[in-house]
Image (spheres, rainbow, N blue to C red):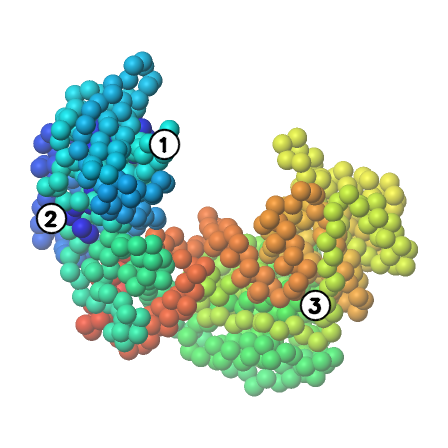
């Protein structure tokens, strides 16, 4: 980073925060320091003694330091070469308690964090030889003579300094300026280098609060200055100065990126990339595609994928059990099907059964779009476990979904000659005891259940395969409890939510992935129509005609009860309106109802006793009524793309032609209009997921708080999916070649993991 880059603060006076100008004497006071502060903190604190290698130079003296930031203590053994980067941020020049507190709001508590706190914008400065050549609205640097000062005639008026060269005049304008400061900076008759934004006022060129006021002997402002994200009392000058000091502390580190990749991409080494990223020469250098930023993004992605690869290796080292089946039961099921499995289903079954037959424990994610046939894949895997002499369990998050799985699996199990049973929290008495006894004796091949499967009294004779549906609804502890029901059973988790490949690699990179990206024959397309809710009477009339012919329909609303704050239609109110029109043919389902009432309403709808189900998004996943052919979604603009796609997937499951009607409330925002247009154009859940990612970002698509997605400082999951895939491949290949990371590149990777604070990976390395 160039040493003459003070940022945008310059030496202007206080008072104009928009210009981020601040007087040097005020700067010292604002940062809680004094005249000697820079000398005191200019050098890193001494490294810890070899006897305590985990202690870096972070004897923190303020509450915003790393010690109180909520970050867990680092694992023992951080290499001493990295100690200077893990000191407190307040050990950097110009950073006192207030600045440290503001830095903490940016999640910057150590010099290491500042290395990855990169500029997000830049200011181009044109050096102009003559004032006559200035162009209003540009940011320019000029050399002028100070002619005279016009002090403000009244409070609130600006101080104006008139400057000139041989070609014209320039007024410098300052609000709330103090006379001693302004007269010392711009003495009459002096030559000064001025840089700032040029404006026209009454026909005269002026600069309001110039960014820089320099003597001709000072280093000139750069032609392009970085602009950093700020918080609290921070100024560009403080951040730029602290970042420069942090970069000076950055050691030269061995190369951890594969050499041929560096050559192919034209990337600099790590140190050069850090310096270049903080010292952009133009807008192109701020792009994700710039070599420096792309390399730093790859470092983050590589560290993350190496962590996941180490977790995967650790799991695979845990001995599993060989579950080898010849495929006799699977063949019986396939023979009984009305059509053959899709290529994607056949591929997924082959991947899963190969994993089960290996001596390592399987940990695989089965990802499939709505109606892609995950149930058949799960059934064939479960039946392979039974054929091998074991048992399988399929766990669902709700009783409704568990019962639907039972209904779908029962004819397949009958074709295979396997006994299947259901266990839910509602099962009591003798029937429950019979199921538990038969399960423990091995007389039940496949158990379908809810959370009730976790209960202590549930014992398997020989659990070989555990399948978890809608896995994001179960915590890690619950999955471990299920795994503990058998002797190292294989684990297959399923999700019906299409996830863009980049997010799947980031979130589930430690798992093997099977994707169902084809729909089985017989699934009819759903015709999607978009209408304003002003035509709701027309919709109700068309619905009545369809119901009179025997059709069944869903009507989805975004809220349970009317809210004074949010102007959205409530399910309760819409139910009353439709009930008045259609009578006893209407039922209501929402998440706040007692489970018994909800199940009864669903049972009436599934059996045909009711034809119209008014619901909230409680029906979003798993509800399977093949006879339902109409989906009405009210206030569709208030739902996300993925949610709309899941709701639409509740129809089109049977023989009848199906339709989905998206009702919107005007006026529509541009993003809402785009969402509805995408739904009308395609039923491809993976394309919809990619569009959703592009529109909303990774955190919103999955929900960052629950998703387990890493939070990268430089890398962008939406736009750098290719880098993520490369990092995943590289990490796995390196572990295959150097399992203990003991080679030259392996040792460099260890440093990278310490630098990126991949504590879990470091713990796994320590465990061997």
What residue is shown with label 1?
203
Tell me if mark 1 has few (under 14), some (14-19) or many (20+) residues whose alpha carbon lies within 10 angstroms of its own: few
Q: Work out whether residue 354 or residue 547 is closer to the camera in this orientation and state it.
A: 547
Query: Between residues 760 and 768, which one lies in front from this camera angle?
Result: 760
Q: In front of the other: label 3 or label 1?
A: 1
Q: Position of residue 527 (x, y in %)?
A: 74, 62
Dot 3 or dot 1, earlier in sequence:
1
Q: Is residue 357 left or right of residue 617?
A: left
Q: Which mark is residue 621?
A: none
Q: Quadrant of residue 288?
A: bottom left
Residue 103 in view? no
Task: Tell me if mark 3 has few (under 14), some (14-19) or many (20+) residues whose alpha carbon lies within 10 angstroms of its own.
Answer: some
Disc 3: which residue: 408
Residue in the image at 14% along x and 35% along y: 191
Per the image, label 1 sits on a secondary structure element best described as loop
Q: Are marks 2 and 1 in contact (CB under 8 Å)?
A: no
């Amino acid at each position: 980073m160039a040493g003459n880059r003070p940022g945008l603060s310059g030496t202007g006076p206080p008072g104009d925060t928009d210009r981020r100008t601040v007087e040097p004497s005020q700067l010292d006071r604002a940062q809680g320091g004094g005249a000697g502060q820079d000398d005191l903190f200019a050098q890193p604190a001494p490294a810890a003694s070899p006897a305590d290698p985990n202690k870096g130079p972070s004897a923190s003296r303020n509450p915003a330091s790393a010690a109180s930031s909520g970050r867990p203590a680092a694992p023992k053994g951080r290499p001493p070469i990295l100690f200077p980067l893990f000191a407190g941020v307040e050990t950097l020049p110009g950073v006192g308690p207030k600045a440290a507190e503001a830095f903490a709001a940016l999640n910057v508590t150590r010099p290491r964090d500042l290395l990855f706190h990169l500029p997000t914008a830049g200011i181009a400065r044109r050096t102009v030889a003559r004032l006559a050549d200035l162009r209003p609205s540009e940011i320019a640097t000029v050399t002028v003579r100070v002619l005279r000062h016009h002090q403000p005639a009244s409070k609130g008026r600006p101080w104006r300094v008139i400057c000139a060269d041989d070609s014209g005049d320039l007024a410098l304008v300052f609000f709330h300026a103090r006379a001693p400061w302004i007269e010392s900076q711009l003495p009459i008759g002096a030559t000064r280098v001025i840089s700032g934004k040029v404006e026209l006022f009454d026909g005269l060129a002026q600069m309001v609060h110039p960014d820089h006021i320099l003597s001709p002997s000072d280093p000139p402002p750069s032609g392009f200055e970085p602009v950093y994200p700020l918080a609290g009392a921070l100024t560009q000058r403080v951040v730029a100065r602290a970042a420069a000091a942090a970069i000076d502390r950055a050691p030269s580190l061995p190369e951890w990126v594969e050499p041929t990749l560096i050559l192919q991409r034209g990337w600099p080494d790590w140190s050069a990339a850090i310096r270049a990223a903080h010292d952009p020469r133009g807008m192109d250098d701020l792009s994700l595609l710039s070599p420096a930023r792309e390399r730093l993004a790859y470092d983050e992605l590589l560290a993350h994928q190496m962590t996941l690869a180490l977790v995967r290796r650790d799991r695979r080292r845990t001995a599993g059990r060989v579950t080898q089946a010849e495929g006799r039961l699977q063949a019986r099921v396939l023979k009984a099907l009305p059509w053959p499995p899709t290529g994607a289903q056949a591929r997924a079954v082959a991947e899963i059964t190969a994993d089960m037959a290996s001596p390592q424990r399987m940990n695989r994610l089965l990802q499939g779009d709505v109606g892609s046939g995950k149930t058949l894949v799960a059934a064939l895997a479960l039946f392979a476990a039974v054929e091998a002499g074991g048992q399988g369990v399929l766990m669902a998050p709700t009783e409704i979904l568990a019962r639907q799985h039972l209904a779908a699996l029962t004819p397949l199990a009958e074709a295979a000659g396997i006994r299947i049973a259901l266990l839910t929290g509602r099962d009591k008495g003798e029937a429950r005891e019979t199921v538990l006894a038969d399960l423990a004796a091995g007389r039940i091949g496949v158990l379908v259940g809810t959370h009730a499967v976790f209960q202590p009294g549930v014992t398997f004779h020989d659990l070989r395969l555990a399948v978890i549906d809608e896995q994001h609804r179960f915590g890690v502890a619950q999955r471990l409890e299920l795994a503990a029901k058998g002797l190292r059973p294989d684990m297959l988790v399923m999700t019906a939510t299409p996830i863009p490949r980049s997010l799947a690699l980031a979130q589930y990179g430690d798992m093997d992935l099977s994707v169902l990206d084809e729909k089985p024959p017989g699934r009819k397309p759903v015709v999607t129509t978009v209408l304003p809710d002003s035509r709701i009477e027309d919709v109700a009339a068309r619905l009545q005609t369809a119901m009179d012919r025997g059709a069944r329909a869903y009507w989805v609303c975004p809220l349970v009860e009317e809210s004074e704050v949010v102007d959205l239609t409530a399910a309760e109110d819409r139910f009353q309106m439709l009930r008045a029109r259609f009578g006893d043919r209407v039922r209501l389902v929402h998440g706040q109802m007692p489970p018994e009432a909800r199940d009864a309403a669903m049972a009436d709808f599934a059996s045909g006793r009711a034809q119209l189900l008014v619901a909230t998004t409680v029906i979003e996943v798993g509800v399977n009524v093949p006879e339902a052919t109409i989906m009405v979604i009210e206030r569709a603009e208030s739902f996300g793309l993925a949610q709309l796609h899941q709701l639409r997937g509740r129809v089109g499951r049977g023989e009848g032609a199906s339709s989905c009607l998206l009702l919107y409330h005007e006026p529509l925002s541009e993003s809402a209009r785009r969402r509805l247009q995408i739904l009308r154009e395609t039923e491809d859940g993976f394309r919809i997921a990619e569009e959703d990612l592009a529109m909303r970002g990774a955190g919103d698509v999955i929900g960052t708080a629950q998703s387990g997605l890493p939070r990268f400082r430089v890398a962008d999951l939406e736009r750098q999916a290719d880098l993520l895939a490369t990092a995943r491949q590289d990490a796995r290949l390196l572990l295959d070649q150097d399992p203990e990371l003991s080679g030259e590149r392996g040792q460099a990777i260890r440093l990278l993991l310490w630098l990126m604070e991949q504590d879990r990976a470091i713990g796994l390395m320590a465990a061997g």
